Image (tube, rainbow, N blue to C red):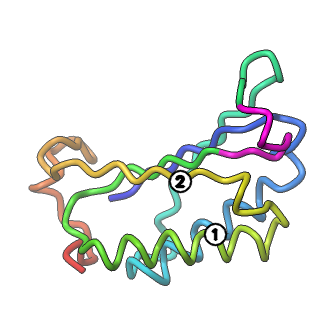
Amino acid sequence: MLQVSIFGLKKSLTPVRQSLSDAIHRAVMQCLAYPSAKRFHRFIMMEPEDFLFPADRTDRYTIIEIKLFEGRAPAVKKRLLTVLYDEILARTGIMPEDVEIILIETARHDWGIKGQPGDEAGLGYRVEL
């Protein structure tokens, strides 16, 4: 299971919303063997007064939080980060210096999916990579 939250300025995310979602999903499918039909992306678009960040970032500064089941090897997660940066730059033009990505792993039993604990849900794809 995987849930993605994308935070940024509304004026910057709105024009690239679909391209950014496509870039993230493409990287996740490639690196985690994730099914194409499973896209769970949430855009949290804010006004400047609600999204404060350091002066060494531009107004395209974007935070991406990916919540996922634990079970992927460190090398797989590092590859995901690399591919994400490449895909985001190629599809949106957002520079890597303006993107922060946080992978948040949790145990399967800590998720509720379709009315049952995540460790009892049939996913149809592998998590251990």
Q: Does the magenta-highlighted stretch encompass residue 15?
A: no
- When the figure is inspected, residue 123 is found, relative to residue 119, above or below; the finding is below
Q: Main secondary structure of the magenta part?
A: loop
Q: CA distance from mark 2 to mark 1?
A: 9 Å
In the rendered structure, find residue 19 and report the number of the disc placed on it.
Answer: none
**Residue at horizontal 28%, vertical 52%?**
105
Verify CB contact (< 8 Å) between mark 2 and mark 1: yes
- Asked whether 8 or 69 is in front, the reply is 8
Which residue bears the numbered disc 2?
A: 101
User: Toward the viewer: 118 or 103?
Assistant: 103
Mark 2 packing: few (<14 Cα in 10 Å), some, or many (20+)?
Answer: some
The three-letter code of the residue at mark 2 reads Ile
Query: Along the horizontal axis of the image, is 35 left or right of 15?
Result: left
Q: In the rendered structure, find residue 85 and report the number of the disc placed on it.
A: 1
Residue located at (35% from left, 48% from top): 104
Residue situated in front as seen by the camera: 114 or 40: 40
Percent x, y of residue 10: 82, 34
Q: Which residues are magenta?
A: 54-62
| Amino acid at dot 1 | Tyr
Q: Quadrant of residue 31?
A: bottom left
Identify the residue at the far top of this view: 49
Quadrant where the N terminus is found in the figure: bottom left
Q: Is residue 56 magenta?
A: yes
Residue 89 horizontal/vertical position (percent): 76, 70
Identity of the residue drawn at 16% across and 52% down: 108
Secondary structure under tag 1 reads: helix
Helix, strand or loop for disc 2: strand
Q: Residue 70: x percent and y percent?
A: 21, 59
Decide which of tag 2 and tag 1 comes sooner along the chain: 1
